[in-house]
Image (spheres, helix red, strand yellow):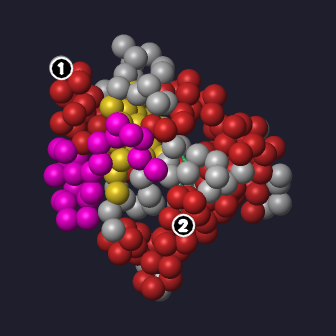
Amino acid sequence: MIFTITVDGPAAAGKGTISRALAARFGLAHLDTGLLYRAVGAKAAEGMDPVAAAEGLTAADLARDDLRSLAAGQAASRVAVLPEVRRALVEFQRRFARREGGAVLDGRDIGTVICPEAEVKLFVTASPEVRAHRRWLEVGGDAAQVLAEVRERDERDMNRAAAPLRPAADAIIIDTSGLEIAEAIARAAEPVARRIG
Ligand code: DC
C-alpha cells in the first residue's frame, strides 16, 4: 500500500504529536522533516557549508541530542530559506513519502511541494501565543523571548521565496488552540480513517 499523510504547519502547533499518533494508529512510518533542517542548521552553525551539509546528511547527524533547542530551531529556519539546501533534501523526503506500507511526514511544505499527490493533507495550526506557551513549557526561560522567537520563525517560514509555509489548496485545517491533545488527534484521524476505509 502506498498511502501518504502530510502534516504541515508552524512551529509548536502540535504537528509532531499528531503525526506520531497517526503513524502508531494506522501502522505507518513517520518522518519529522524539521529534523533534517535542524541537523543542517546545526552543522552550518559549526561553520560547515549548509549545502554540503544537506548533501552529506547521515543518520548520525539526525540522532544528535542538541537538535530540539530553540537555537537549533532558529538555525534550521535560516538554512531552510536556501533553495539549494531544500533541493538536496527533496529526493529523500519524496522516497520516504511514497514508500511501501505508507508514511506520515510533518513539516512546512510536504503537502505543497514534497508530496502534492498525498492521500490526506492536514494543516495543523494554533495562535502564536498558544504555541509559544507550549514551547515555553518544554524549554523554560523567558516567556516573552520564546514568543518573539516563535513570531520571528513564523515570519521567516511564511515569507521565504522557496517553498513558503502555507496550506495546500486541498488541506484540512486543524486549529489546535483550544483543543486537548486527544481531541486534536481524533480530528486528524477522522479523514484518514475515512480514506483508508
Ligand atoms: O518543525 P521544526 O520546528 O522542527 O522545523 C525547524 C525549521 O525547519 C522550521 O523553522 C522551518 C524548517 N522546515 C522547513 O523549511 N521545511 C520543512 N519541511 C520542515 C522544517
Q: Position of residue 3 (x, y in %)?
A: 37, 22
Q: Is residue 110 above or below residue 145?
A: above
**Closest to the observer: 158 or 22?**
158
Label 2 or label 1, whichever lies nearer to me, is 2
In this rendering, position of residue 85 left or right of residue 47: left
Give, as a three-letter code, the residue at label 1: Gly
Q: Amino acid at mark 2?
A: Glu
Residue 40 lies in the magenta-colored region: no
Where is residue 88 drawn, in percent x and y?
Answer: 71, 37
Q: What residue is drawn where x is 65% and y is 37%?
A: 89
Q: Which residues are magenta?
A: 166-187
Residue 58 visible in the snapshot: no
Q: Position of residue 51 (x, y in %)?
A: 78, 45
> 167 or 134: which is nearer to us?
167
Residue 167 is one of the magenta-drawn residues: yes
Looking at the rendered structure, the secondary structure element under dot 2 is helix
Measuring 61% from the left and 30% from the top, which residue is drawn there? Answer: 92
Residue 43: percent from left, percent from top? 74, 55
Query: Are the residues at dot 2 and dot 1 in contact (C-beta closer than 8 Å)?
Result: no
Left or right side of 26 for 105 = right
Q: Is residue 153 above or below residue 34?
A: below
Which numbered tag is attached to residue 197?
1
State the CA–CA distance, disc 2 to disc 1.
Answer: 38 Å
135 or 89: which is nearer to us?
A: 89
Mark 2 sits on what residue?
Answer: 155
Residue at disc 1, secondary structure: loop
Query: Where the N terminus falls, by quadrant?
Result: top left
